[in-house]
Each structure stands twice: as C-alpha cells, then as structure tokens.
Image (spheres, grey):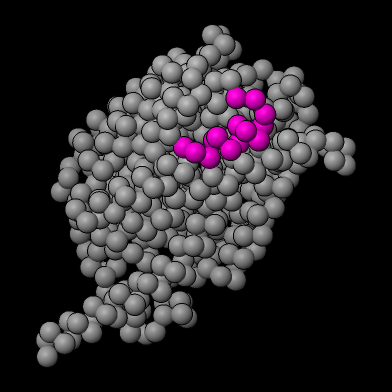
Amino acid sequence: MKNDSQSNESALEKTAYAKITWHLIPFLFLCYITAYLDRVNIGFAKLQMLADLKFSETAYGFGAGIFFIGYILFEVPSNIILYKVGARIWIARIMLCWGIVSGLTMFVTTEWAFYAMRFLLGIAEAGFFPGIILYLTYWYPSERRGKMTTMFMIAVPVSGVIGGPLSGWILQNMAGIMGYAAWQWLFLIEAVPAVLMGLLVLTYLKDGIDKAGWLTESEKTIVQKHIRADNEHKKDHTLGQLLLSARLWCLAFIYFCFVMGLYGVGFWLPTIIKATGVAGALNIGLLSAIPSAVAIVGMVLVSGSSDRQRERRRHVAIPAILGAAGLIFSTVFSSNTWLAMAGLSLATFGIVTTFPLFWSLPTAYLRGTAAAAGIAFINSFGNLSGFVSPYMIGIIKDATNSTNAGMYVLAGFLVAGASLTMSFPSALVDR
C-alpha cells in the first residue's frame, strides 16, 4: 500500500509540474525575449544612429550604459512592490511602460535626449528580471529551479537569434519609409511586442499556486508541500541584516563580473563583427545569431548536468572561464571573421550559461521579503556593470580605434567571477 501511495503521489507530482511548466515557462520566455530585444537593440541602431545624429562612441557607450542607472535606482523598490501586490499587475505595468519608452526613443535628436530616454527605459524595466526569478520560487523548489530558470533565460540567446537578423533586415530595408530613418523604425517595431505582451500578462499570469485554476486541488496541495519543505532551511532577514551580509555582497560582485561580460558582448557584438570586415547590416545581423544559437545548446546541456548532479558552483565557474577564453580568442583573431566568430560563440556560450545557474545560489537560502530584496539588490548591483562595461569600451574604442583592450578587461572580470563563485559555501547551494 505504501508503495502504491508513493507511486500515486509521484505521478501526481509529475503531472502538476508538467502543467506548471507548460503554462508558465513559454509565456515568461516570450516576455523576456521582448525585454531583451528592447534592451540591446541599441547595439544595432548604433550602426546608423551615430552617423545620423553625430554622436561619438563615448556618447553611445554612456547612453547605452545609463539605462542601468535608472534600472539600479528602482530595482529593489520595484521587486518589493511586486512581492506585495503580486506579479500579474506589476509585471504588466513594467512591460507596458518599457514598451512605450522604447518606442519613443525613435524621436531622439540630441545626446541629452538619448541619455534621458535610456535612463527612463531603465526605470521602466526595473524589477522585471528579479521579479520573474522571485516568481519562479513560488512554483518550483530548489532542485527543479536550475532547469526552469535556464528554460526561461534561454530567451537571452533566442532574442539574439531572432533580433539579430530582424534588426539587420529593418536597418537594410526600412530607411526613408514615411520619412523616418531605419534605426527609428527599429525602435518602434521592436517596442510593439512588449506592449502586447504586457496586456496579455493581465489576463494570463496568476499570482501563486492557490490562484492557478488549471491545477486540481490535489496538485496544488502537493506543489505547496514541496515549496514549504524547500523554504524550511531558508532564513528570514531584515533589509538591514541583508545589506550587512558578506555573502550577499559576494554574490553581488560575482554577478557584477558576469554582467560585465554579457553587456560588453551584447552592446558591441555588431560593431565587433563589422570590424572583422563584414559589410551590410543584414549580414552582420545574420552572423550575430550564430553565437546566440551556440549558447542555447550550451545552456540546456549545462543546466541539465547541474540539476542531475545537484551541483551549482562548478557549473557556474567553468562556463565563465570558457567565456573569458572565447573573448581572448576572438580578440587575438579579430582580423579573421570566422575565427573571431568561433571565439565570440564560445564567449557567448560561456557568459550566457553562467546566469541561470548563478541564480540558483541566492534563491537557495533566501525567502520572503528577504528573497525579494536580496534578488533585486544582487541584480541591481550587478547591472551597475551594464553602465560601466559599454561606457568603458566606448572610451577605449575612441582612444585606440579598437575594442581589443576592452575585451581583455572583460575576460579578467569573468575569471574573477569564477574564482569568487568557487569560494561560496557549497553546503548552502548544492541541493
């Protein structure tokens, strides 16, 4: 009888999580694709925008990076509000606001207007990513969350696979239509999905297990039992205690190092590809999809290995080291398009793969308001490098007419992040 009971419970658990995954992950995945497109399409707009508006590389780097100042300032308050009012209303508000602001960026004509719109876009989007990471803890226990976070975050490379060719096509074919430049159409067209998805969030997303009408009462009970058991080992912290935690600051700096690599590549990939001798916006867009496609495969394989072994640290650190190696390789062979692309593919695979498994670290030991604030703090501190990275590379490129030195600096940060990851106590996160 006991074996029959365990077998029934196991079957019920499997059905429940299959329903949750099919209902939530594809939808959240689409939401994140729209977010990431609007965040990094500036890298493609740059190919034409700078010449039209007479901006310097430094001005571009500052504008690309100032997004993160607005993002950082509003990240923690936004995530705490999401925790209080629920994900449905707050995620919808975020997506609608950033879609509108991103679309309005098409009208900038001066450096200060460009800075203002990028800053406002950061404010609008603040809380989206950490909010989703928090939201996943409401549905999945630690041992399932690595794979689920990866499935959600595959949206980053997928947005590259979709966004690169799409952006290249827009830049090559939309110039002059209705009197607007192609880069203006780029901002407008890629803002529309965010607005549409924001409206869908209001009707589709549920705030928690108890409101999921697509689960039976038995399924709700078993999932809630797993979530309660997962939270038993976690501690509540006040915001003050959290900010004094050495572990929190260690995680924040690790994330800072990884984001340095992510946005260094994300904002400058089209420029790097162009510098290898590739001509034509569409060709650049198509080539930029290759590293993202490689990253998708890598993310799935590494996250599956991590969940099976219930090991997190090495599965974060090793891809970070590979990402650093890829950046160095792409720089050494920057005059050869295909060797540079091989290096950029390795770099993108390594960098992007670190992120979903990194989030297994803080969510493994924080809960409640502490989880909301802690996740947001780590994300906001880490995204400070989203300002530092493109601005630094812009200065270096203006000074040297090359991004090579910048790529070496980014590789160094990835190695530092990998080293700090291995210093984190395995007992807290390997479960």
Would you say the magenta stretch is mainly helix, strand or loop? helix
Q: Residue at x 46, y 77 (%)?
A: 211
Q: Residue furthest top?
A: 400
Residue 167's spot in the image, x, y percent?
65, 40
Q: Is residue 174 visible?
A: yes
Q: Residue furthest bottom?
A: 1
Image quarter hosting the N terminus? bottom left
Q: Residue at x 55, y 35 (%)?
A: 287
> Magenta residues?
278-291
Asked whether 202 or 106 is in front, the reply is: 106
Image quarter hosting the C terminus? bottom left
Residue 55's spot in the image, x, y percent?
70, 20
Whether the magenta-drawn stretch holds residue 104 is answered as no
Q: Residue at x 41, y 77 (%)?
A: 210
Asked whether 185 or 346 is in front, the reply is: 346
Q: Residue furthest left?
A: 2
Task: Give the quadrant of residue 283.
Answer: top right
Q: Is residue 112 visible?
A: no
Residue 39's spot in the image, x, y percent?
58, 41
Whether the magenta-drawn stretch holds residue 286 is answered as yes
Question: Where is 401 relative to 322, above or below?
Answer: above
Question: Where is 218 relative to 91, above or below?
Answer: below
Residue 421's spot in the image, x, y percent?
25, 36
Please count the marks in the image.
0
Question: Where is 196 relative to 245, above or below?
Answer: below
